[in-house]
Image (tube, coloured by chain):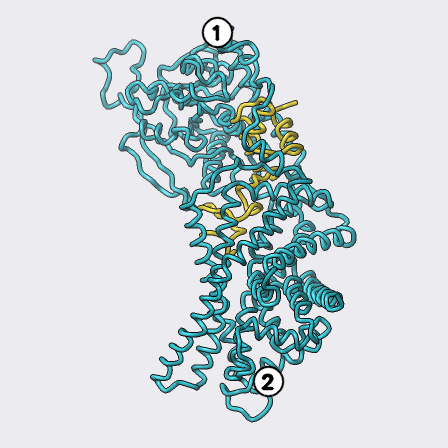
Chain colours: A cyan, B yellow
Amino acid sequence: MSCHGPASSPVPGRSGTATLAGTTAPSRVLLVGCPNVGKSTLFNALTGARQHTTNAPGTTVELATGTWRTARQAPPGQGPAGYNAADSVTERVIVDLPGTYSLLARSSDEQVTADTVRELARSYGEGGGQPGVVVVVLDATALARSLYLLAQVAETGVPLVVALTMLDLAPTATDWPGAAMEPDTLAAALAASLGVPVVPMDARNRTAGGGGELASAVDAIAQYPRGVSGLVPAASSVCCGTTAAAWQHHDAAPDMTQELAHAERLFEWVEQVSEQVSTCLARPLPSAAHGPAAATSVRRSPGPLPRTFSDRVDAVLLNPWAGIPVFLAVVWMLFELTTRFAAPLQSAIGQLVNGPMASAVTWFLGLFGLAGSWAQGLLVDGLLVGVGTVLTFLPVMAVMFAALGVLEDSGYLARAAFVADRAMRSLGLDGRALLPLIVGFGCNLPALAATRTLPHARQRLLTGLLIPLTSCSARLTVYVLLAGAFFPDHAGTVIFAMYLTSVLLVLGGGLLLRRTAFRDVSAGPLILVLPPYQRPHMRTLAMSVRLRVGSFVVRAGKIIVATMLVVWVLMAVPVTGQHAVGHVPVADSLYYGVAAGIAPVLAPAGFGNDHAAAALMTGFVAKEVVVGSFAQSYAVAEPGNPARAGGLGEQLRRSFEESSGGHGGAAALAFMVFVLAYTPCVAALAEQRRLFGWRPTASALTVQLTGAWVLAVLIFQVGSRL
Amino acid sequence: MSAWASVLDDVASVGGTPAQVATRLGLPMSLVQAVLDHAERLGVVTVAGSNCGSGCPTGPGLPPACAGCPLALP
């Protein structure tokens, strides 16, 4: 291989003769490159003001298109006097495609780039003139990454030219010894290795930035196209025919062995080019700054590794024996912090809603003669009590979101996922299933949707059956209420125990299913890459907490208000006795007629009272309304009974003590486990049916209800005897 | 062993950030990033900090799977 030919020329013709004169410009030039490599700067320099923006066909992705004008070279032997000025300018349409690291697209922007390049390759393959040329913009400071994209573009078979940018920053590149070379030297070495023109660019310098040289190279390669050395254009190449997103949505994954083998070849080529360039660059400078070891191999000797802060912390946090206890301790502290810090604020909001606000609404209704009417019942005992009780959980949510935000932004949660992944794999579960399962701790619904990223239908079904066992944030409100009412001194520990129970249920359920109905599912490959540790950005964190709390209030609020209205209507409809609609003792209402029918079934678990049965019934709609249902049912049932005075916690304790024969704490624990284990919500049920069909969903529903009942009975029966 | 194989082997057995992997293997950072990016697109690697596996994703590129999640940022 010759190292030091000109960077951008000559371009040999088919006869092997180098020629530039008389070439015809391509109709279109596509600018392709990684994000932030100076592609748009180059586009602006080449087009000036002659550009406009349009959407890519069928998408909302914007494409900048412009006209690239250059002076045409006079034919040989024809002087300026005989040269028509009107013919002296060559115009090309140039398109600035969205930046991408790969043609294996993951976003609509990247897809537009990949599709446009492939469309050009198809046009080129069909013949008929010169449909266009691709200019691949290479970043001199991160050459390997740019070469990877270049390889993918070259494999499509399009004629291409390389524009080398970021040369002024190349001396600062630490991972690429050749980057600090002279621009022309580096470009020539690359051109020799790649076999296509390489033009060093300085887009900020319009007169001497390399625009003319690039135009000549583009026109020449359009007329005499040739491939990149070491790469064979392949229209059926696995790299370019399938996107990651596409194959993930098929039951049968593509031939991964073929994909991996292709990737191996592709990166061998990247390494080979890097080493050839290093070798070329080493020849004029055989010693001193670029010794043989550094210059002839892209690899550096690993040598003694400097231990960074991340290394020292990861040595502990990524160790399975230390990492899991640390993770559990962090989660326990999170709940302790949440419950202790938020408790006074919760109390203040509760008093405000149930005291002055309820009085104000009653007074306001009295102005219109509605005091004591069904309207007061609906607004005060229904909506205000239900929504107000849920509002008391805003401090809990805010503190928890802030703490989770700190853990997430710092990079710790990623380490926790890494350690948990290893633990799951050691139990024989697929590590890939970890991701949707962890989403389930936020909300089961998107977690079920996230199973679509799993490559096999059986894996999706297995994970989808386990997701309802993950404790979503809506269930947290129930834990906070009951733990605060029954275990005020250890509320954080109790909530932590509920999350631990959730994890154990997932692992136990997974092991059971893997050893019975899902013996055919095997763990697939998954490797987690960790982000570096960093200090959380307080402003971003505050915005994140505000948005998440706001989102929780709006989305949960809609469900709560709608459900509370339905519940109130059901409470206003009499099924026994002679009562007018809206003036029904709760025991005679339709709502409690159904709840009273369910309550005996729950008696062995210690919470066979109408209030608990009714709350579980509404909890079927969404777990957010369980707390509101409790508050509403106590308010409606005994609005003016002094014997029932006290806060919601006090009323809950009385009910559970009565229904459990004096073992209220055990009954409360059993109730929380029931809430954890039974169907998360109607929406999750509908999503399961949509993804997996009626039969698995109906089976899962039966197992969830039965399992929740068995667990609750077991916990109460054991707990009440301790 | 090729850069592709050595990077994946290292991440699978030891784990860590791309910078740590690059340092351990003596490879250019951009090559390690390119290998991991390609592996992630093939679905054999997940960047733990950029998806729901480590909490909630943020920013405009919210995955479709997070639509409707009360914890996801708009």
Residue placed furthest toward the bottom? A578
Q: Nearer the viewer, mark 2 or mark 1?
A: 2
What is the distance, in whole Å, between disc 2 and disc 1 at their CAs? 94 Å
Give A342 or A296, whichever is nearer the viewer.
A342
Give residue A450's position: percent from left, percent from top.
Answer: 58, 51
Residue placed furthest toward the right? A516
Looking at the image, residue A473 lies above or below residue A630 = above
> Which residue is the site of mark 2?
A587
Is residue A706 visible to the viewer in this orientation of the structure? no
Residue placed furthest toward the front? A489
Disc 2: host chain: A
Q: Residue at x 51, y 21 (%)?
A: A228
Q: Is residue A600 left or right of residue A283?
A: right
Q: Secondary structure at mark 2?
A: helix
| Amino acid, disc 2 | Ala
Q: Within 10 angstroms of label 2, few (less than 14), some, or many (20 or more) residues?
A: some
> Which residue is the site of mark 1?
A285
Q: Secondary structure at mark 1?
A: loop
In the picture, which quadrant includes the C terminus of chain A?
Answer: bottom right
Give A483 or A22, whichever is nearer the viewer.
A483
When asked about the image quadrant of residue B5, the answer is top right
Q: Residue at x 64, y 62 (%)?
A: A676
| Amino acid, disc 1 | Leu
Is residue A435 visible to the viewer in this orientation of the structure? yes
Give residue A704's position: percent from left, percent from top.
Answer: 69, 63
In the picture, which quadrant includes the N terminus of chain A?
Answer: top right
Give residue A230's position: percent from left, percent from top.
Answer: 56, 20
Looking at the image, residue A336 lies above or below residue A132 = below
Disc 1: host chain: A
When asked about the image quadrant of residue A685, the answer is bottom right
